[in-house]
Amino acid sequence: MKSGLMKEKVQATDSREFEIKLDTQLCFAIYGAAHAFTRTYKPLLEPLGLTYPQYLVMVTLWEEDDLPVKAIGDRLGLDSGTLSPLLKRLEQSGLVLRKRDREDERLVKISLTEKGSDLRQKAVGVTKAIGQTIGCGMEEAAALRDALITLRKRMNETD
Amino acid sequence: MKSGLMKEKVQATDSREFEIKLDTQLCFAIYGAAHAFTRTYKPLLEPLGLTYPQYLVMVTLWEEDDLPVKAIGDRLGLDSGTLSPLLKRLEQSGLVLRKRDREDERLVKISLTEKGSDLRQKAVGVTKAIGQTIGCGMEEAAALRDALITLRKRMNETD
DNA sequence: CGTAACTAGATTGTGCGCAATTGAATTGCC
DNA sequence: GGCAATTCAATTGCGCACAATCTAGTTACG
């Protein structure tokens, strides 16, 4: 089963040589796919004035508005060092508001402006275009999504 | 088949609502998995003095030495704006040499130093550790790799 | 109370990632 | 040979991504 796929010049390594190559290939594949996604989204998001990570933040806020920075970070796996400047740029663009919470002054609540909410309609078109681009069946996409989520969980557990 | 999974508050959108959510989830998943990979590799690569992208470049050179910048960029999907400073850091670390090709003075050939070649042995341990971390069967990993490669190709064709 | 431990967010510094520009070298075409 | 188009690399500018550090606000405990 794993025979017939060995490289020509395997020298002095054990039978795990193939597995090692596979791991590397998997990490190449994920790395490449992530950037390909970013590149594919980029021209589509440009008309909206959003970068890809900014788009992810907006999607999060469209799902649930008025979230503290921390909550956004937890959902996207980003820390304040990334989000603070990003959110300031979104505020600059007039898409969100940043307000300290009266209840707990440590929190900065991020809420959508009307402009930010309205952008959602335009974004639907973008996502449809992506659907065309990845152009695979739902089952395939769902399976891939689940595999990636599982992989990520496994890696996060291990730290 | 796609019924029973619709969100509660679907308003005035067509039946593609679910697919749109799926696309977004897939892009979240890839985005997250890529960063999880980077985070997982980071502590393992630290003893080698490499970042994750630097590691990818080294893997490429271990596969084939003495490559021009362009060739490395093609394999990893990176351009000279990313690679030029990265390669200079690798040179600074004493892992690679950067030499103009005599044949074609436009090319800068990147070659491994002895230190760079030797590092491969230490890296084998790292990759084994990753194998433990992702900890899934070969078939599973291979299927995931292939799905990602297919996805990436589809996206690259569409630009 | 009052101080120690904790939490949220901002800031700083390093390193990608990519578009756009520049400059040098090579190739192609007459 | 001579000039234009092309190719390769480097540089610049902007935006993430994250570790480490800092400040301010909150909670816990004696």
Image (cartoon, coloured by chain):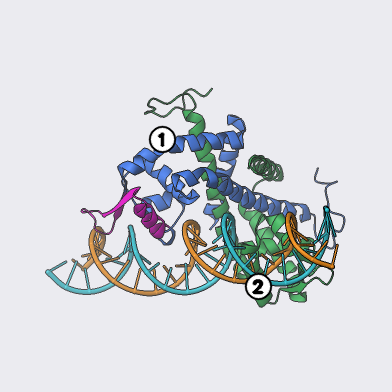
Chain colours: A green, B blue, C orange, D cyan
- Give the CA separation, mark 2 to mark 1: 45 Å
* x then y, percent, for residue C13: 49, 65
Task: Give the residue pinned by disc 2.
Answer: A88
Q: Residue at x 80, y 46 (%)?
A: B2
> Residue B121's mark?
1
Quadrant where the N terminus of chain B sits is: top right
Residue B39 visible? The answer is: yes
Tell me where the magenta segment starts and ends, as one range. B83-110
- Count the numbered circles shown: 2
The answer as to whether the residues below labels 2 and 1 share one chain is: no
Residue B153 visible? The answer is: no
* x then y, percent, for residue D18: 59, 55
Asked which quadrant contains residue A144, the reply is top right
Towards the viewer: A102 or A143: A102
- Dot 1 crowding, Cα within 10 Å, few <14, some 14–19, many 20+: few
The three-letter code of the residue at mark 2 reads: Lys
- Dot 2 crowding, Cα within 10 Å, few <14, some 14–19, many 20+: some
Q: Chain of mark 2?
A: A
Q: Residue at x 78, y 56 (%)?
A: B17
Asked which quadrant contains residue A41, the reply is bottom right
The three-letter code of the residue at mark 1 reads: Gln
Q: Is residue B103 magenta?
A: yes
Asked which quadrant contains residue B115, the reply is top left
Circle 1: element type: helix
